[in-house]
Amino acid sequence: QGQLVESGGGLVQTGGSLRLSCAASGSIFSDNTMGWYRQAPGKQRELVAAITSGGSTNYLDSVKGRFTISRDNAKNTVYLQMNNLKPEDTATYYCNLASLTGPYDNDYWGQGTQVTVSS
């Protein structure tokens, strides 16, 4: 079984920034498209951003222009730079396999990293 370790979350004020990191095992990362998902209390998990091994990206409409996904293939790591954060961005953030057109129904998830944006 692969491994996913998310980090970088925290408590920030509205308008602040955070950079999330996700270290993935090679068996997961490989040449696969990776994504950042988030789940707020009482809501379904949603795909926020995705990036192919070649660097093509796609974003949830509500984060376009504020979030940037990137990856370092040599380090098996995917990042999410989050700027101009809003209270509605508060959620636990996870990375996992994805596609540019939508989420994957992944069986395994890491522990996630909590992002809390205060108003």
Image (cartoon, rainbow, N blue to C red):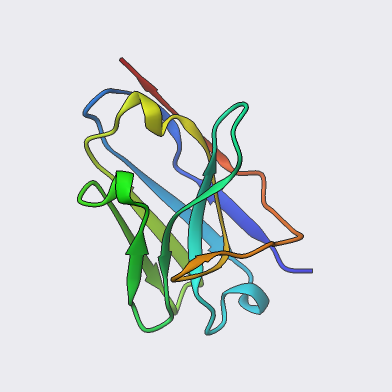
**Which residue is pictured at 24% across the width and 41% down the height?**
83
**Which residue is pictured at 59% across the width and 33% down the height?**
43
Foreground pick, 21 / 36:
36
Foreground pick, 42 / 21:
42
Quadrant for the C terminus in the image? top left
| Residue 10 image-quadrant placement | top left
Question: Left or right: where does residue 81 sit relative to residue 20?
Answer: left
Question: Left or right: where does residue 83 sit relative to residue 41?
Answer: left
Reply above or below: 80 against 12.
below
**Which residue is pictured at 74% across the width and 58% down the height?**
108
Foreground pick, 78 / 117:
117
Residue 106: x percent and y percent?
70, 62
Residue 51: x percent and y percent?
40, 70
Reply above or below: 38 against 24.
above
| Residue 74 image-quadrant placement | bottom left
Quadrant for the N terminus in the image? bottom right
Number of numbered discs present? 0
Reply above or below: 83 against 94.
above
Residue 75: x percent and y percent?
47, 72
* Residue located farthest toward the right when viewing the structure as drawn: 1
**Which residue is pictured at 64% across the width and 73% down the height?**
28
| Residue 12 image-quadrant placement | top left
